[in-house]
Image: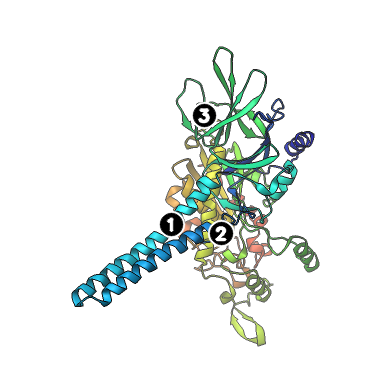
Amino acid sequence: MYRFFLFTLLFLFNPLSFLAENGRVVHIAWAENRDGSIQHAKGPQHGLVFFEQRNQFLNYKDPNNPFFKIRYSLLGIDWTLVHLLALLLTILLQLLTFRRINRRMAESRFFKRWSYRLLKLFLWAAVVAGNAVAIWAIDFYNTQIHFRFHQLSDFKHASVTTLNKGRNNRTYFLAKETSHTRNQLYIKRKQKWYTQRASPVLHFEQQEDGKLFFKYDKRYFKPHPDSTRVLASSQLFVFHHKKADGKDTALIYEFANKQLVAFELKKDRPKRVLLLVNGYRPTSSSQDPEKALQAINDKGLEHPRSRNLIYGSDLFHYWPQENFIPVFEKRLKIERTFYADGHHSVRTSNHRSLLQFMSSASLYPQPCVGTHHCSTTKIANQQEVRTYNLLATKSNKEGFNQRYQAGKQAGRNLLQELSKNGNDPQNDTLYVVSHSMGHAYLMGMARVIKGKIQLGNYYAFAPENPKGKTFRSSWWQVAYQYGTKLYGPQRHAPCQQDGVAPQWRMSGLSAAQQIGFPKELRARLGYFSSHFIGYYTWVFDIPKGKQGYIGLP
């Protein structure tokens, strides 16, 4: 009991326990007494422990159950012995059926034989469909029935701390992405842990003696007792207080600032919202090889890809703080600022691998001093090649689409964040700044949020793979691309090009919407420098009325 309560306090007041207050699934734990009431219900968090908020359910693999143990994942299905047995049974029935048909075909004359052949063709199609239906049915049973409420047999007598650590162990749990707003519950009853998938609104009943019981989960809730039901856009907690006279008064809470806070249906008013979408986050930005190698040893070659959450601060210290974000906020008259993480592996870029990127960077010439002499470059065996050929200009459509699809999940989380307290995002206007890989990510977000919020201005800095997908500039009031120019009469010299993300014009933009990096800023140009977001403060020098101006009309 004491350990459970102590862990609750430590978890709630740990500043690193919740880095984002949005996500498709909130993971919640509590322990129950023998009568089913929740322990420590009189505390400020009503005995609930919030593990995390993420975009995935954690499916229990049930490793000690030979029938439902997840053997491997393939084609979006978590294969168990039940799947395989069902598949073998259907195949056996099909073989017996075909054997009987073949016997009759051998005994039949010409026309009847062809009739059986047509029947076999039809049966083959039915076989494929039948096997697919059988696998789908088993998978549906596993996820929606068998594992919807299930005992965690490997965590009997475990403390809440042990369970929380075990949730990150792939031996026991498998993360499954979801686009639905839900909860995952971890309930301790008689020293046994159970997990349950639940709808976003959890209903509890508090009796006059203070005992608290979990009752049921729903997708809808009533903001006021006399109002109609509305679909919950985020996770809510409804506490019903039963009186002796039978009256039911309900208090609604939501999760904010790492704790339960009273849900307030605030008066909705239009707001200007700024969203900054970062790109690739290297493990080291140091140009000292020894320091860079040490960072790789400490953190690995690459950071894990984005968790697709929305943050209220620059968690990764990606953006220039003093002379960048405040200028956007002031000129656009921003009231709320959010951050999205578009970081993905280098393999999703036009470079296609970290090794290829490092190889190209090592061969690319340094910026010229004086007259340009960089049209060609000598590579291995002193072979001379056209410098532009060293740039990664072949579009990686598959990698772009991976970031685009991930951005859709972030878009759902942005809407969830903006919809809190009954706010209607359709009254708000969104202004976006993206950099590098963040462009593909933002396009995925825009696909989800279009029509649910007004889209204002979009400023794309050095977008990676700008031709990966056609950009819908008509969705936005203003859209500009900033960076070097790869072609045309105003193109930059080869040594000045952005080698990290070669700058073709984004598909869907006019030539006037592509703003070139000023060539007079020679010290800020080069393979890496032309891509560095900290060198783009020159955009604020563009006067009002000119193409590329940052600000309101």
Image vertical order of residue 459 relative to residue 376, above or below: above
Query: As shown in the figure, which amino acid type bears the numbered disc 1?
Result: Ala
Query: Marks 2 and 3: CB-CB under 8 Å?
Result: no
Q: Is residue 372 above or below residue 203?
A: below
Q: Which residue is mark 3?
A: 268
Instruction: Give the CA distance from mark 2 to mark 1.
Output: 45 Å
- Picture residue at 60% right of the left edge, 52% below the top: 175
Identify the secondary structure beneath mark 2: loop
Q: In the figure, residue 521 lies in which quadrant?
A: bottom right
Residue 15 visible to an observer of this rendering: yes
Residue density around tag 2, few if under 14, some if 14–19, many if 20 or more, within 10 Å = many
Q: Give the residue at mark 2.
A: 463
Nearest to viewer (mark 2 / mark 1): 1
Q: Nearer the viewer, mark 2 or mark 3?
A: 3
x, y percent for residue 418: 55, 37
Question: How far across and down, in percent of the image, does residue 141 sit?
Answer: 49, 49
- The answer to whether 250 is drawn above or below residue 368 in the figure is above
- 431 or 201: nearer the viewer: 201
Tell me which numbered mark, 2 or 1, is placed earlier along the sequence.
1
Dot 1 lies on which element?
A: helix
User: How many residues crowd mark 3 within 10 Å: few (<14), some (14–19), many (20+)?
Assistant: few
Q: Determine contact: label 1, label 3, CB under 8 Å.
A: no
Say which residue appears at 77% left-offset and 64% top-offset. 297
- Is 107 on the left-hand or right-hand side of 304? left
Please tell me the numbered disc located at residue 154.
none
Q: Which mark is residue 134?
A: 1
